Amino acid sequence: MTSVTIPNSNISIGSAAFQGTKLTDVYCYAEIVPEITPDVFYSYYILNVTTLHVPAGTIELYQAAEGWKMFKYIVEMNLEPVKGDANGDGAVNAEDIVVAVNYLIGNQSDDFKFDGADTNNDGVVNTADIVAIVNIIMGN
């Protein structure tokens, strides 16, 4: 494993979760900095080689936060919508199908992201987009 993606929906990360890995990149989509202990990423390699990618406008929060501030390289990401990411957490998974279906039946949630759900860029979210989200998840 050379990279890891932490979605926006993540609240916390367990102790020593990434110790001993040779991560080159950590992509954290959380706009509220997840609480971690200093040992979650602690290794010479991670702290001196790995780049932590964080949402635009949050770099100072990560630079000040326990466990995160130890990264030597922290850069901001300009978050373009990820096609299929209907809930905006930075990952495409079954949760996106649920959010998109709820949108279609009129139960739109606060975390619904139209640009991510509109996979074919036709200006509408419909069953074709849900099929596309499933295909993205399945690797098709």
Image (cartoon, rainbow, N blue to C red):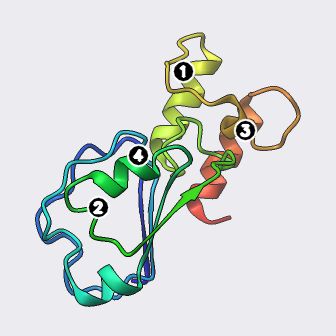
User: Dot 4: what SS?
Assistant: loop
Q: Earlier in the sequence, mark 4 or mark 2?
A: 4
Query: Residue 135 appears at what percent x and percent y?
Result: 65, 55
Return the x and y of residue 21 as percentages of the image width and height.
Answer: 28, 85
The amino acid at mark 2 is Trp
How busy is the neighbourhood of tag 2: few (under 14 within 10 Å), some, or many (20 plus)? many
Q: Is residue 96 left or right of residue 113?
A: left
The residue at which mark 1 appears reads as 102
Q: Which of marks 4 and 2 is in front?
A: 2
Q: Amino acid under label 1?
A: Asn
Q: Mark 3 points at which residue?
A: 129
Please indicate whether residue 92 sits to the left or right of residue 34 in the image. right
Instruction: Name the image quarter holding the N terminus.
Output: bottom left
Crowding near the residue tagged with mark 4, few <14, some 14–19, many ≥20 C-alpha atoms within 10 Å: some
Q: Which of label 3 and label 4 is nearer to you?
A: 4
Disc 3 to disc 4, C-alpha distance: 25 Å
Indicate the quadrant where residue 108 lies: top right
Contact between labelled residues 1 and 3, with CB atoms less than 8 Å apart: no
Q: Distance between the residues labelled 2 and 1?
A: 35 Å
* Disc 2/disc 3 C-alpha distance (Å): 36 Å
* Lower position in the chain sequence, tag 3 or tag 4: 4
Secondary structure found at label 2: loop
Residue drawn at (56%, 26%) of the image: 112
Q: Are marks 1 and 4 in contact (CB under 8 Å)?
A: no
Q: Which mark is residue 30?
A: 4
